[in-house]
Amino acid sequence: MKVAVGSGKGGTGKTLLSTALSFIVKDCTFLDLDVEEPNSHFFIHPEIKKEEDFYIEVPYVAKECSRCGKCADVCEFNAIWVGNDVHVIDKLCHGCGSCIYFCPESALKTKKRKTGIVRIGERGRIKFVQGVLMVSEPLSPPLIRHIIKNYKDDRFIIDCPPGNSCSFVHSIIPADFVILITEPTPFGLEDLRGAVEVVKRLSKDFGVVINRATIGDGSIRERMRREFPVILEIPYKRSIAEAYARGENVLPRMMGEELRRVLEVIG
Amino acid sequence: MKEIAILSGKGGTGKSTLSLALFGLFNKNAVIVDADVDAPNLHLVLEPEILKKEDFEGGYIPSFDSHNCSLCGLCEEVCRFDAIEVKERIVFHPYLCEGCGFCWNVCPSGAIGKKREKAGEIYISNTRFGPLVHARLFPGRENSGKLVMKIRMLAKLIASQKKIDTILLDGPPGIGCPVISTLTGCTYTLAITEPSFSALSDLDRLRSLSYHFGVEIGVVINRWDLNIEITKKIEESGLPVIGKIPFSYKIVEAMVNKKTILEWEIDEGIKKEVRKIWEYISSLTG
C-alpha cells in the first residue's frame, strides 16, 4: 500500500483523511511531507524518538582563485556572483554541484547548510516521519526527497503539501495511488482539476474524496461526481470541524467502514 | 504605495474570500494580485475582462539530440535530481528537472541543448472592482516564486500608471518560495487564521517568516466561533487581532454565485467586521 493524499486547494482535509487512514490501517509508515506547515502530529500524537538535522550542500570558495567567472556562468540560479570576490548566495543554491565540477582551479568546495529537520517517532504500530523546513528557507523539495529516499517502505501513507507545483509533485512520486481530497466549491473544483492534471502526467492511479460534501447547493458536487472517480464523500458536520480544531480526528469512529472500503479500492 | 500580503500559513482559512471582499471595498482604488499562482481562484468570482496575456517562461530545461548522443551516461551520472535515465535511449523526467544545466554543460558529444519552455500564463485584466493581475503556473512546474515576483512588478506598474496607491496580494498557503516572494518588501501581512491547533502552529511559523523579512503582521480570526478557547489563545498571543469573523453557510453560497461576501445576503455583523478590517488596512501607510 503506497498512497499519497493531496488536494490542490489548501484546507480540504488532507491531514484529516491521511491520519484517519493510518488509524484504520494501524500498521504502516506515515510520512508527513507538508514540510512547510506540518500538522499530522496533532492527530497522530506520536512519541518522538529522534530528530535529525537535514542539510543541503552548498559551495564555498576554499582558496584564492583567478575569478574567471566560470562558476557564475554555469549557475542557472544566480546563486554565485563574481566581482572583486566570489559571493555565494546560499538560499538560491539548489545543490546541483555544477559550479564545483566546472571550476578549472578546483577552488570551490562544499559545506553543509541546515535547512530543516526530520522527526521520527511512533504511535502503536504506526511509524511516524515528519519533515519540518526551517522558517525562511524557500525550498521544500530537497527535504521531501530526502525523507522519501530514506524512510519510505512498502506500506506508507503520505500527507502531501497543498498546491499543484513542485512540492506536491515530489510528494507523490513514490505513490502507487493518489487520493485527491476536495470540497464542492468553485475554488475546490478549479484546484482539483490542476491536481488531477499533475497526477495524470505522472501516470498515477487516483481517486477523489469530496469533503464537506453537503455544503453549497449540490451543483458542484454533481459536477465532480461526473468528472472524476469519486471514491468517498464526507458530509459537512460542524462536529468534525470542532473536533479537528481540538486535534481530534473523529473520522475513524464516524466512517470506519467507508474508510476500510477506500483502502480496499486502493489495494 | 502600500502592498498588503494576505497570507495564512495554513490552507483553507479564507484568504481569497476575504481578499475579494476587501478589494470590493476599495472600489477601484486598489490593484489586486492573485499570488497563489499554483492554484489561482480570484478570477472565478471577479469574472475578469482580460486586457493582456503574456507567456511566462520558467528556467531552461535540456533538449536531447539523439543523433549526436553516444549514450555514454554522463548526464545521468551528474544529475542530482534523478531527472535523466540513460537506457537504450534517453528518458527525461521533466517534473524532476530543476534546470541546473549540469547535463547540457557536461555532455561530451554536444548532444544536449537547452530551451525555455512556456511554464505559465500571466493575465492583466479589468474587473468590476478594479485591476486584477493573475497568473497560472502550469501544473507541476517550478519557479512559482519567480512568477509571483513578475506579477507583483506588473501590478506596481499598473498602480503607478493609474495613480492607485494600494496593492492587495492574495497569497498561497505555506511558507516556502512563493510565499516569500509574496511577502518581501510588503507594508503589512494580514494573516487569516482559524481557531485550530493546526492553524495556530502554522500561524506561528508565518509570524516568524514575516518578522524575518521585516514585515509587520496582524491577524484576522475566521470561523472564530469554532473554538472559543483557541480564539482566546490567539487574542492573547500578542499578535494584533484586526478582525474576527464567525462561521457562515452563506459564504459558500456567495462564491458559487460569483459574488463577494459583501455582495451577498450575509449577516450584517460579518459585513461590519469586514469593513472594520478594511478601514484598518486603508489607514496603513506605505
Image: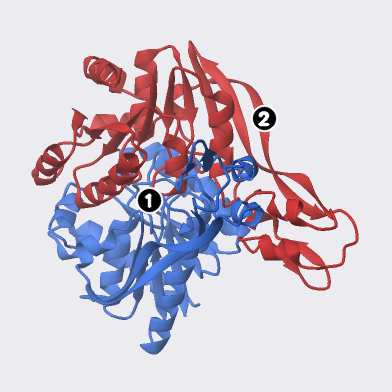
Chain colours: A red, B blue
Horizontal and vertical percent for residue A239?
Answer: 25, 29
Q: Position of residue B243 (x, y in %)?
A: 37, 57
Which residue is painted at 51% across and 35% down in the image?
Answer: B87
At mark 1, the secondary structure is strand
Quadrant of the frame with the N terminus of chain A: top left
Height in image: A84 above or below B101? below
> In the image, what residue occupies the spot 28% across and 36% down?
A181
Q: Label 1 belongs to which residue? A: B221
Is residue A236 shown left or right of residue A72? left
- Residue B100 appears in the rendering: yes
Amino acid at dot 1:
Ile
Mark closer to the observer (2, 1) = 2
Q: Please provide percent x and percent y for residue A62.
A: 87, 53
Q: Name the residue that disc number 2 marks.
A: A52
State the quadrant of the C terminus of chain A. top left
Residue A113, above or below B257: above
